Amino acid sequence: MPRQERAERSRAAILDAAADEFDQHGYAGARLERIVERTGLTKGAVYFHFRSKLDLAKALLEEKYGNWPAIVAEIDGSGLRGVEAAVELTQRVGGVFASDVRVRAAMALSQTVLPPGPDADPYEHWVGVVERYLAQEDELAGGLSPREVAIVAVQGFFGAYMIASERGRLDDLRADIDRLWRALL
């Protein structure tokens, strides 16, 4: 196997192991020794890619933020509009949260160790995306503005995710998202 491919596989294995460790133990409880053990690599190989637990956390966070533009682009290109597009967006993102340990770990890290700076509010970004879809509707229930509904939808989505995560019910997140939208609309 070529060296570059081996390095990429090693890096992926390290990030998977770190995500599992952070997901199970949080940042404070995570141990580099367990991450190394989970990878099956040598300690030197792990340290070649990442010098510290903080470097691992930063890499997971960078990767998390890189996932979302592709989902938004897929929905933009799907022909869905308005409420349907907003619902599809939250369902797809919810599916990623439920199934991708790297994203879950990064989400927890962004809530604790590596919060976004004041100029990089991810919730405001999501409100903007959902608002853009909702603005495609002629009218929303209750005469609310697209922004008002988007704010509540994003708050409800992330609340549903946090509660499902805490309770170990991520398999039910999609149903929670459906209930949220039915209540909003």
Image (spheres, helix red, strand yellow):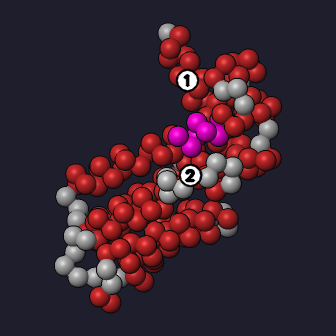
Task: Reply above or below: 72 against 179.
Answer: above
Q: Amino acid at mark 2?
A: Gly
Q: Residue at x 67, y 67 (%)?
A: 167
106 left or right, relative to 124:
right
**Seen from this angle, which residue lies furthest bottom?**
142
Q: Which residue is mark 2?
A: 117
Q: Residue at x 61, y 52 (%)?
A: 115
133 left or right, relative to 39:
left
Mark 2 Cα within 10 Å, few/some/many (few <14, many 20+)?
few
Q: Residue at x 22, y 75 (%)?
A: 137
User: Residue 7, position in %: x, y?
Assistant: 56, 18
Q: Which quarter of the rendered picture does the C terminus lie within? A: bottom left
Q: Is residue 90 visible?
A: no
What's the magenta region? Answer: 56-62
**Which numbered disc flags the more N-terminal residue, 1 or 2?**
1
User: Residue 49, position in %: x, y?
Assistant: 63, 23
User: Residue 91, position in %: x, y?
Assistant: 41, 62
Task: Reply above or below: 162 against 105.
Answer: below
Q: Label 1 to label 2, Cα distance in Å?
A: 31 Å
Q: Is residue 154 visible?
A: yes
